[in-house]
Amino acid sequence: MKNGITSDVSSLFEKNGGRLDNGKYVIGKIKKKMPTLSDFQRKLKQRGKCNELAELLVPFLKGNSLGIFDCESRITSDAEVINFDMSEIKDEFTKLYASFVILTWVWQKYVLKNRQKKKIIVCDEAWLFLKYKESADFLVNVARRGRKYNVPLFIGSQFIDEFLNCEERKNYY
């Protein structure tokens, strides 16, 4: 596997301590450079038999319309506040897609972890979710399941009428 990364957790680290590329010194483990979606897509292309899947991934690669997640991540779920800034995303569909991915990540890595710690999820521009039945159901599901985990969902929107007239909202409240 690339960079010698295996199922063994210790394979995620280069060595103990040393000097980083930026000249700083580190005591403890140094993380290896993690593979990205572009690395995976290149590997699929090299195999030859996976060309169709490799081509399907192209829109999700850096430099393309849905390539916002084609990168390494330094996010840890131990942080007190985690903010995802999507202000540079101009396309509504891409913003909705990114919101889905982020909320799913927040649920898996933040809500389900350490149930005793109080947490709050804040979703701004939530009106985007109400444009489609499936995404509205997803947002309602996050809100309803969040009650079980003592995690309220606060939504922000400039279009309150979208919420007041939403059929999904009427079915659940």
Image (cartoon, rainbow, N blue to C red):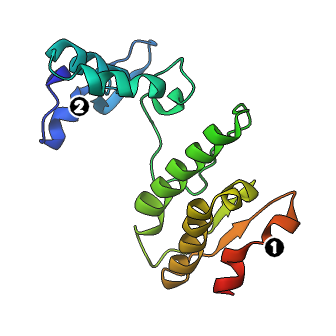
**Dividing the picture into quarters, in which one does residue 70 lie?**
top left
Residue 165: which disc? 1
Front of the two marks 2 and 1: 1
- Let me know if residue 18 appears in the view: no
Marks 2 & 1, CB-CB < 8 Å contact: no
Quadrant assignment for the C terminus: bottom right
In this picture, residue 169 sits left or right of residue 40: right
Q: Please provide percent x and percent y for residue 150.
A: 54, 81
Q: Which is nearer the eye, 105 or 167?
A: 167
Closer to the chain start, of discs 2 and 1, is 2
**Residue at 57% over, 69% down:** 137
Residue 75: which disc? none
Q: Which is nearer the eye, 95 or 8?
A: 95
Q: Please provide percent x and percent y for residue 57.
A: 38, 27
Q: Label 2 vs label 1: CA separation?
A: 51 Å
Q: Please provide percent x and percent y for residue 86.
A: 68, 39
Q: Is residue 129 above or below residue 55?
A: below
Q: Which is nearer the eye, 120 or 96?
A: 96
- Let me know if residue 160 appears in the view: yes
Amino acid found under the numbered disc labelled 2: Phe
Residue bearing mark 2? 13
Callout 1 secondary element: loop
**Residue at 54% over, 76% down:** 146
**Dividing the picture into quarters, in which one does residue 13 lie?**
top left
Q: Which is nearer the eye, 157 or 146?
A: 157
**Residue at 13% over, 25% down:** 1
In this picture, residue 145 sits left or right of residue 8: right
Categorize mark 2 by other alpha carbons within 10 Å: few (<14), some (14-19), many (20+). some
